[in-house]
Image (cartoon, grey):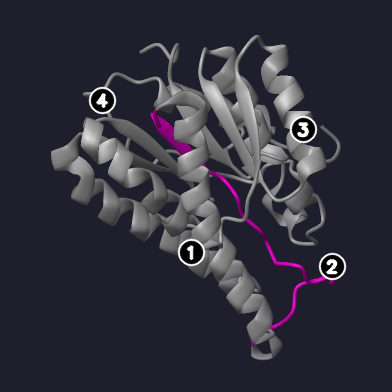
Amino acid sequence: MGSLEGKAVIVTGAGSGIGRAAAVMLAAEGASIVAVGRDRAKLEETLAAVTGTGGAGHALVADVTSEADMDRMREETLAAFGKIDGLVASAGVGKGSSSRVFPVNTSILPLSEWDEVLRVNLTGVFLSNRAVLAEMMEKRSGTIINVSSYPAGLKGQPYAPAYSASKFGVAGLTESLAEEMKPFRVKVHAVFPGLTATPMTSSSALSGKFGVALEPEQVAELITYMMALPEDTVVGDPVMMPFKTRKRKGV
């Protein structure tokens, strides 16, 4: 596995969950981290954990759905570390800013919720990816890891049409971009983590149907492994789920 010493990596959605775990673990392996999110207080907690590993970090309050913010993300990363070697696009939402707990039938799903989920989960991935491409193409190296979902990114889930559509979209965007970037030696991956114990899933009434949850650190280990692979090695669409079973009653 290649070394992350001297690498500059951006992590979106770094305020909590998979994004925070990835930022901390990548820093522990030597990467300099730009932690991106919308909540400054949460980002400062992530930054403290990053620097606690002995790594270098920079917290950036930015919205992945804003083209201007993603351009600013690129410029601040270059100003802080002089280059961009990697991007982990993990910012995402389940049902947007809706306060409801239980899912609703698609026939009454508000358009505002559909738009918000697609904008964060898919347009946000596109904008964050696009922001780093020119730098990576120019130096003919770089790794992008986009976080999709399992099973929602591979099989449509009832009562989650916006989430499933967005995560399918992440997979399609990633595959398209991976082919486009091959001549520039820029690697673009998607990962498909199963149910993971994050603030987003803890608020969902659907989470129980998927059984045992992964810890964010388990997903971060896979992301870190992929980020550190040699430049001539890729990993194809890894699905990650816990190897656990529930005990049957009476056993």
Q: Residue furthest left?
A: 183
Locate residue 34 relative to residue 210 in the image: left or right: left
> Mark 4 and mark 1 in contact (Cβ < 8 Å)?
no
Locate residue 121 relative to residue 136 in the image: left or right: right
Reply above or below: 211 against 220.
below
Task: Please report the bounds of the magenta region as a residue range.
Answer: 83-106
Locate residue 46 relative to residue 146 in the image: left or right: right
**In the image, which is nearer the foreground, mark 3 or mark 2?**
3
Q: Which mark is residue 44?
A: 3
The first of marks 3 and 1 along the sequence is 3
Locate residue 194 relative to residue 130 in the image: left or right: right
Is residue 88 inside the magenta stretch? yes
The first of marks 1 and 4 along the sequence is 1
Q: Within 10 Å of the Cα at label 3, are there few (<14), some (14-19), or many (20+) other Cα atoms?
A: some
In terms of depth relative to the viewer, which is nearer, 233 or 4? 4
In terms of depth relative to the viewer, which is nearer, 231 or 210? 231
Reply above or below: 43 against 56.
below
